[in-house]
Amino acid sequence: MKKSTKKNDKTIFIAAAIMFACAIGLFVGAFARFQTVVGGSATLKTADWSFMVNGGTADFSVNLADGTAYNLVEVDGEKRIQPGSYGVFPLVLSAVGSDVDVTYNANFGGLSGEKIPTNLALYSDDQYTKPLANVSGDVITAGQQKTVNIYWKWLYTETDETEFAGQTLTLPVTVTGYQVDPNA
């Protein structure tokens, strides 16, 4: 009986050694391979963007007395407004040079430290019936421009606005152009 136990032990040992050798072979074989890393790049060209107001991309200036204005006073060849004056000034909004459609928002007045006459009002219509503080929403097609007329009136009332006499006043206008969402 002792011989058979030794033979079984020997068989078990040989089987274990073979299994261990197979396991090592599988483990080593799992890490043997060929490998190539290929680097590259993706090329893209972005759309052009252009938005201008009255020909400017950084700032613009409008003189209320220029263009179409009524009830002005002329002093030494210079036109000046007074209570009772009214008129219109254009905002020429341009997407010329842009590959994408543009929408915009224009805000008037409200900068701290700036003071404008109490009765100077802006309107969106030539009947001076629709007051406005901002203008927005229309889409300007890429490569096109749009003119938005802003109507103004310095109402003649019983309010004393003498503090504005002989002054050069600034009405802040901020116009922001935005790309139209192509997914909308």
Image (spheres, helix red, strand yellow):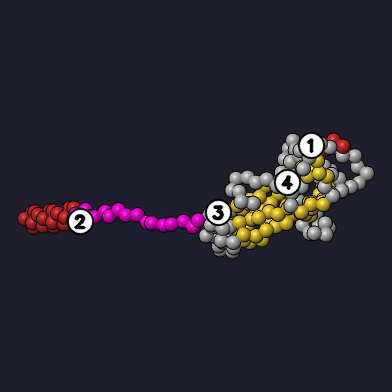
Compute the Cα span from label 4 to label 3: 25 Å
Residue ranking furthest to the front = 76
- Number of the front mark, 3 or 1: 1
Whole-Å distance between the Cαs marked 1 and 4?
13 Å
Instruction: Indicate which disc residue 34 carries.
Output: 2
Q: Nearer the viewer, mark 4 or mark 3?
A: 4
Residue 73 spot, x, y in % from top left: 83, 44
Disc 2/disc 3 C-alpha distance (Å): 51 Å
Badge 3 or badge 1: first in the primary sequence:
3
Task: Give the Cα separation between the discs numbered 1 and 2.
Answer: 82 Å
Amino acid at circle 3: Ser
Q: Residues within 10 Å of mark 4 (few under 14, many from 20)?
A: few
Write the residue at 78% across / 59% down.
125
Mark 4 lies on residue: 63
Labels 1 & 2 near each other (Cβ < 8 A): no
- Residue 167: give its label: 1
User: Regarding mark 1 in the picture, which secondary structure is present there?
Assistant: loop
The answer to whether marks 2 and 3 mark residues whose Cβ atoms lie closer than 8 Å is: no
> Looking at numbered disc 1 in the image, what kind of residue is underneath it?
Gln
Q: Which residues are magenta?
A: 31-48
Marks 3/1: CA–CA distance: 35 Å
2 displayed left or right of 99: left
Q: Which residue is mark 3?
A: 50
Which of these two is toward me, 174 or 57? 57
- Viewer-proximal residue among 77 and 61: 77
Which residue is nearer to you in this view: 148 or 175?
Answer: 148
Say if the magenta span includes residue 37.
yes
Q: Mark 4: which secondary structure?
A: loop
